[in-house]
């Protein structure tokens, strides 16, 4: 797993879920950390280091799509083709994931839709708090969706 160094809730939850999965399956977690401000180069460098320390790795989940693109570049430079030797997935179905070669398999969390829903919900709550016609409500985000592409052998 390749995650950002920042203390984001999503990184902490992903790390915990990965640790639970590994414990349940009797495998040791392997986690690389990169600073988001480094972009693709940070993902590249973290992947080079990860593969140097763990050459047996045959799959990588990079939570940040920018890191995933950098990781694909690093894997190619090391002579290990994606997906034949190492499969790569990420969690944001943005332009980078689609433009990467090979295109990245993603777990689409519908983040753009969630942002719009969050803003709408905020305005509804603010209007309700001010006694205007707004009604405080809740929303249910779309369920994650697996978008299979070539980087995972799809």
Image: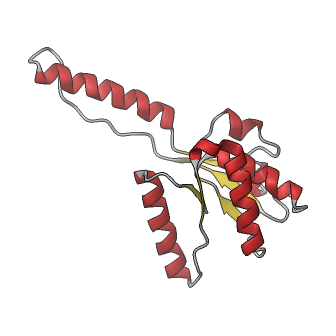
What percent of the width, then of the height, locates residue 145? 56, 46
**Residue sitting at x 64%, y 48%:** 106
**Would you identify the image quadrant in which residue 138 lies?**
top left
What percent of the width, then of the height, locates residue 102? 81, 46
How many numbered marks does the figure carry?
0
User: 36 and 86: which one is in front?
Assistant: 36
Q: Residue furthest bottom?
A: 26
**Residue sitting at x 46%, y 31%:** 113
Locate the N terminus by quadrant. bottom right
Q: Is residue 154 above or below residue 116?
A: below
**Would you identify the image quadrant in which residue 81 lies?**
bottom right
User: 140 and 118: which one is in front?
Assistant: 118
Residue 116 placement, left or right of 108: left
What percent of the width, then of the height, locates residue 56? 77, 76
Q: Is residue 85 above or below residue 128?
A: below
**Would you identify the image quadrant in which residue 124 lies?**
top left
Q: Residue furthest top?
A: 132
Q: Residue furthest left?
A: 131
Q: Is residue 148 visible?
A: no
Residue 77 placement, left or right of 2: right
State the scheme by which the image is colored. secondary structure
Q: Residue furthest right?
A: 79
What percent of the width, then of the height, locates residue 127? 18, 19
Q: Is residue 33 visible?
A: yes
Q: Is residue 71 above or below residue 30?
A: above
């Amino acid at each position: 797993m390749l995650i950002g160094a920042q203390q984001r809730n999503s990184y902490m939850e992903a790390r915990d879920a990965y640790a639970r999965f590994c414990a349940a399956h009797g495998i040791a977690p392997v986690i690389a950390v990169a600073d988001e401000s480094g972009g693709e180069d940070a993902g590249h460098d973290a992947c080079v280091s990860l593969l140097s320390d763990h050459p047996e790795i045959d799959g990588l989940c990079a939570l940040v799509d920018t890191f995933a693109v950098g990781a694909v570049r690093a894997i190619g430079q090391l002579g290990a083709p994606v997906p034949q030797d190492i499969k790569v997935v990420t969690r944001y179905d943005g332009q980078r994931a689609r433009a990467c070669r090979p295109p990245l398999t993603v777990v689409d969390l519908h983040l753009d839709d969630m942002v719009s829903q969050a803003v709408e919900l905020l305005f509804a709550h603010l209007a309700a708090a001010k006694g205007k016609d707004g009604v405080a409500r809740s929303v249910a985000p779309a369920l994650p969706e697996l978008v299979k592409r070539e980087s995972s052998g799809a």
